[in-house]
Image: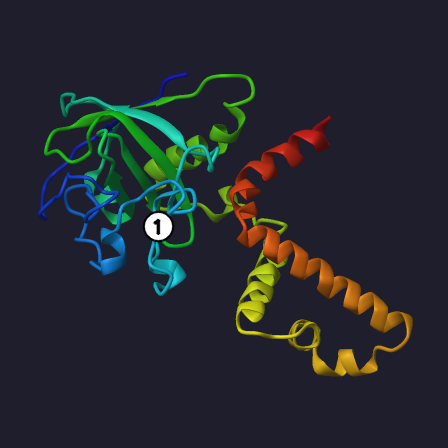
Amino acid sequence: MRLAILVRRRSTARVSCGSGCDATPATSPGIPAPRTRPSRSRPAGILSYGGCIFAEDPSIAVPAARIVWRAEIDPETLLVDAPSVGADSADRVDAELLRKYLFLVQDPGGVGHGVLSDGVHRIRFDVMQGTLCSDEAVTLRCSIYGTHSAEPKLRPLARLLDLCRRGCFAPTLFPREPKSARWIALLRVHDALAAGASGRDIAAELYGAQHLAASAGAGADSLRSRVRRLVREARAMARGGYRTLLHDRYRVGRARRR
């Protein structure tokens, strides 16, 4: 399946198209230069970045952060080619739109890894051939294949088409993750453990001191069991379990439909 989208690129800012994994990330023309921090200069091995092509500084607030997960980790990653093309096609996308949302890094092999994001919504893609760091017009040819691998890419493809038509992200195409509350709880538990909190401290923080004080007998045992499960899950997640979260969504979805 091929989708051709014409993009007219105009340079309004200096672009670095070097290795985005071990130096300042390459961005598309017109994108403001990314924040420079020492943590971005270290080599980006698979393990050192925990599954990321580009790992953001954890001190950066979520709306401003841009984490670029590897395609093996994020099954929604679109694979695109970006060959140069004439600028007279009706499929042309306004460059101002992409400059508003695009963040792109380039690895030593020349593959561009990027996201279109407003800080809340995101579309992840890899540029396998061609470049977006150019003043020329290009087409984005999205490759989707396989009966299993294609399914996770249909939703980001619909989001990309809608973004190109509307010029903004449609919240209705980004449904709330049903497990998000659980994942946030696991993050809180992990942080609490790292700070030396006890199981009782964690229970009081998550469920409230009054609920903890009111629990007695079987209720206390139930609460302790809940906290212990959270502690086990948080530790497993920190050991690398987080890398399976994006794939797990589709395995669960397929199982429910059977």
Name which quarter of the figure residue 64 lies in: bottom left
> Which one is nearer the viewer's eye here, 242 or 30?
242
- Left or right of residue 87: residue 221: right
Task: Give the x, y percent position of residue 100.
Answer: 25, 48
> Which one is nearer the viewer's eye here, 242 or 232?
232
Task: Give the x, y percent position of residue 37.
Answer: 23, 60
- Left or right of residue 136: residue 105: right
Name which quarter of the figure residue 17 lies in: top left
Compared with residue 254, is residue 19 higher up or lower down, i.e. above or below?
Answer: below
Q: Which quadrant, please, contains the N terminus?
A: top left
- Residue denoted by label 1: 55
Q: Which quadrant, please, contains the C terminus?
A: top right
Task: Give the x, y percent position of residue 158.
Answer: 45, 32
Compared with residue 77, is residue 217 higher up or lower down, i.e. above or below?
Answer: below
How packed is label 1: few (under 14 Cα within 10 Å), some, or many (20 or more)? some
Which amino acid lies under the numbered mark 1 shown in the image of this protein?
Answer: Ala
Name which quarter of the figure residue 123 lies in: top left
> Which one is nearer the viewer's eye here, 14 or 100?
14
Q: Residue at 60%, 60% (x, y): give it.
A: 186
> Which one is nearer the viewer's eye here, 124 or 96?
124
Residue farthest right in this picture: 217
Compared with residue 129, is residue 207 higher up or lower down, i.e. above or below?
Answer: below
Task: Give the x, y percent position of residue 227.
Answer: 72, 65
Q: Residue at 25%, 53% (x, y): give it.
A: 40
* Number of numbered tags placed on the structure image: 1
Compared with residue 98, is residue 32 higher up or lower down, i.e. above or below?
Answer: below
